[in-house]
Amino acid sequence: MPDRTEGTNLASISTLISAEQIAQKLAEMGAAISADYRDRTPILVGVLKGAFIVMADLARHLDIAVEFDFMAVSSYGAATKSSGVVRILKDLDQEIAGRDVLIVEDIVDSGLTLNYLLKSLAVRKPASLEVAALLIKEGVERAPVEIRYPGFIIGPEFVIGYGLDYAEKYRNLPYVGVLHP
């Protein structure tokens, strides 16, 4: 594997969750989602930018018909902690009233962004509104959110890779790592 930290001033990136572990977890999540939505066609809503990799790989583990849409929200900017101010940068392209909606997230950190998103989508009267998240940070959540399809519980460290970035870099790593400056 090429050194993807070349040309940076980083000391190192340590692997927290391997590509193999992620693939196994997404297969498990996909099986549960497929069973729960067996006779329905949910809309998977990816929260950009981070969730695009998670959503693509999760969708490959689904054996049901699905539709895709995306939203872009921001509460971080270039920081490593949520600012608490949520902005919708891109809204859905399709109506969700009466539809089954599954939000796909890369990570749930403070829960503020997801809580805001759930409230925003709930007023549009979907038939159901659930969440699948690859990573859930433990010990930092401030807003209560229910994750129907949880992936991995992680500590409070700042993570990159598999869609997660630091200043728009490292999303392309095939694993989840911890950045050590």
Image (cartoon, grey):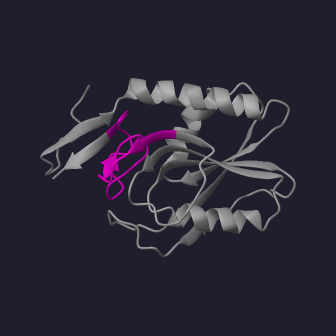
Give how far across and how far down residue 12 sits, in percent. Answer: 16, 42
- Could you tell me which residue is drawn at 61 percent across and 53 percent down? 146
- Could you tell me which residue is drawn at 60 percent across and 68 percent down? 116
Q: Main secondary structure of the magenta part?
A: loop
Quarter the N terminus occupies? top left
Give how far across and how far down residue 165 sits, in percent. Answer: 36, 52
Please indicate whether residue 33 sits to the left or right of residue 1 in the image: right
Closer to the camera, 150 or 169? 150
Quadrant of the image occupied by residue 19: top left
- Could you tell me which residue is drawn at 62 percent across and 58 percent down? 71
- Could you tell me which residue is drawn at 41 percent across and 26 percent down? 21
Looking at the image, the residue that sits furthest to the bottom is 85
Question: Height in image: 61 above or below 181?
Answer: above
Please indicate whether residue 54 sits to the left or right of residue 42 in the image: left
Please indicate whether residue 43 sits to the left or right of residue 84 in the image: right
The number of numbered badges drawn on the structure is 0
Quadrant of the image occupied by residue 178: top left
Closer to the camera, 95 or 84? 84
Give how far across and how far down residue 122 sits, in percent. Answer: 75, 63
Closer to the camera, 136 or 181? 136
Question: Height in image: 123 above or below 46?
Answer: below
Question: Height in image: 108 above or below 21?
Answer: below
Give how far across and how far down residue 126 sits, in percent. Answer: 81, 56
Q: Is residue 43 magenta?
A: no
- Magenta residues span 151-176
